[in-house]
Amino acid sequence: MKLIGSLTSPYVRKVRIVLAEKGINHEFTNDPPFSPDTRVAQVNPLGKVPALVMDDGFVLFDSRVIVEYLDEQDSTGSARLIPATGSQRLRVKRWEALADGIIDACVAIYLERKRPESQQSKEWIERQQKKIDQGVQAAASDLGDKSWCEGDSMTLADIALGCAFGYLDARFPEVKWRDTYPNLVRLANKLAERQSFKTTVAPN
Ligand SMILES: N[C@@H](CCC(=O)N[C@@H](CS)C(=O)NCC(=O)O)C(=O)O
């Protein structure tokens, strides 16, 4: 299978971390979707990364669908990152939605700031900023003093949140989440020690 993505996308990073954690063999094609010569739309009609081209040519998107598929691949007998059933499954998926939602708001601001200054909407940026602030606050409150977001080992919830932290640090240093939420810092530091996180840090 072949993953098409960019080295800076937090959604792609989530998929790359899942691939690494599960030890799944794959090729990676770096195809930033905003570059003029991108071919992403030839595989994903939405023109977005990540896209996963399976061995039979079938293409999966978006990141939430891809990680579901990958988690079912059990080549190395690795632990499930998404519980198969029940309320824990729902809770992990909710964490993922929260983390992806924080990233969505970050990306919206990032793209808005790339427009000519006279065309940027202050109201739009403030609206997205509120989602980031409230999303991070909710994550801190839901994590509390637990070691992991759900259960007693790392799940997709932690991976997704770790990708949101990484994107905040890279693109939004003005969001001072590290000064405000020591429990999130503890989780972020623990995740950052993992090989899967180390090898997927976005280049500057
Ligand atoms: N919900 C999607 C979001 C994917 C997404 O927006 N990716 C960005 C890169 S960070 C992209 O490809 N943008 C290109 C575009 O919007 O045209 C997912 O989780 O895969």
Image: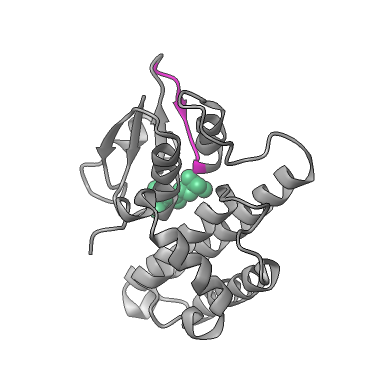
Query: To which quarter of the image does residue 87 belong?
Result: top right
The residue most toward the right is 87
Where does residue 68 sit, x and y in percent of width and height? 57, 35
Provide residue 147's location: percent of width, then percent of height: 61, 63
Query: Which residue is pictured at 56% across the width and 80% down the height?
Result: 181
Residue 195 shown left or right of residue 160 in the figure: left
142 and 137: which is toward the camera: 142
Q: Which residues are magenta?
A: 57-63
- Front position in the image: 104 or 152: 152
Residue farthest to the top, as pictured:
56
Q: Tell me the quarter of the image containing the N terminus.
A: top left
Measured along the vertical axis of the image, is residue 64 above or below residue 102?
Answer: above
**Does residue 17 appear anywhere in the picture?**
yes
Residue at (39%, 40%) from the top-left corner?
Answer: 20
Task: List x then y, in percent, for residue 7.
Answer: 29, 50
Residue 58 counted in the magenta span? yes
Residue 112 seen: no
Placement of the C terminus among the 4 image quadrants: bottom left
* Residue found 40% across the figure and 46% down from its top: 12
On screen, residue 117 versus residue 154, left or right, reads left
Residue 148 image-quadrant placement: bottom right
Q: Taking 105 as reference, is 121 above or below it?
A: below
